[in-house]
Each structure stands twice: as structure tokens, then as C-alpha cells.
Amino acid sequence: MGRIVYISPDSKVVRSPDVSAMQALVINPPPGYWLSGSGSGSIEFEDGASRRCLLLLPNETYGIYLKYIVFKNGVARETWLSLQDRTMLSKVCECSDEWYASIGLFLPRNIAWLGIQEFLKTGKRSENVNWIQPVELPDGGNW
């Protein structure tokens, strides 16, 4: 198992986060949790020379958008975006402090949790989540 670090919206660093506590933050967060600080969170998974990051970008109306990034030699080499609805990729909404993303990237919280849970265990993308790469976004879309 790799080294796992969770960084909360208010920049608190939690090493080896408790899985059930993370589930609660995704499924039923305390009021205002995702509105504090940056309005987003990240999980870093490191094992040996490999580092992967999962960004958690919530929107109260649409759910949670996940961005999976693979780093090699400190440089982002691969990026994947969660996908819920291709027909909503050209419409955007705010999902973090002044960060706008395509509505079609947001997952229902229970599906987002499946992706987060897999990442916490393995550092990999979950097969329970549909993923696309940024080049697949249409004009007007954002990630």
C-alpha cells in the first residue's frame, strides 16, 4: 500500500485518512464543509517513484467531479475526468473557489464515493466511474 494524504478544503493535511471518515465527508458532509477554504479537496497516493492525485471538486446541486492525475518525474503526464452526462459537457458551473467545470463531469455522491474509495485502496481509477480525457470536452466545456 502506498502513502496516502488527504488535503481538505481548508488546507488541513491528513495522513492515512480514515476511510469511514472520508465516506462521511463525501456522502453526508457537515454543513458548509465544502464551502470553506478552496471549496475542494485532494488525495495524493504515492508508492515508490509513482505519484497520483485525485481532486474532489463538489457542487451542491450537481454532485462531485473527480479529476485523476498521474505524475511522472514531478510532471502531470496523464489526466482523466469523471463523466456522468456527455450531453451536459458544454455547460459549466462553479465547483470550487472560482473554478468552473462542465456539469456533465459531476457524479452523484454515491458514485463519486466508489471512485474515491478505490483510489484510497489502490491509487487507481475506479471501473465504477466513467472517465474521459480533457481533449474529449466540446467547445464551451471546461475542466
Image (spheres, rainbow, N blue to C red):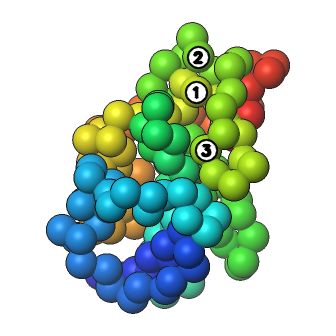
The residue carrying mark 3 is: 95
The residue carrying mark 1 is: 103
Classify the position of the N terminus by image quarter: bottom left
Question: Could you tell me residue 113's position as x and y percent?
Answer: 30, 50
**Mark 1 neighbour density, 10 Å: few (under 14) some (14–19) many (20 or more):** many
**Residue contact at pointers 1 and 2, CB within 8 angstroms:** yes
Q: Secondary structure at mark 2?
A: helix
Q: Which residue: 32% across, 57% down? A: 29
8 to the left or right of 29:
right
Classify the position of the C terminus by image quarter: top right
State which tag comes first along the sequence, 3 or 1.
Answer: 3
User: Mark 3 and mark 1: span between their CA atoms?
Assistant: 9 Å
Relative to 10, say whether 88 is above or below.
above
Residue 140 seen by the camera: yes
The residue carrying mark 2 is: 88
State which tag comes first along the sequence, 3 or 2.
Answer: 2
Task: Please state which amino acid type lies under the numbered disc 2.
Answer: Met
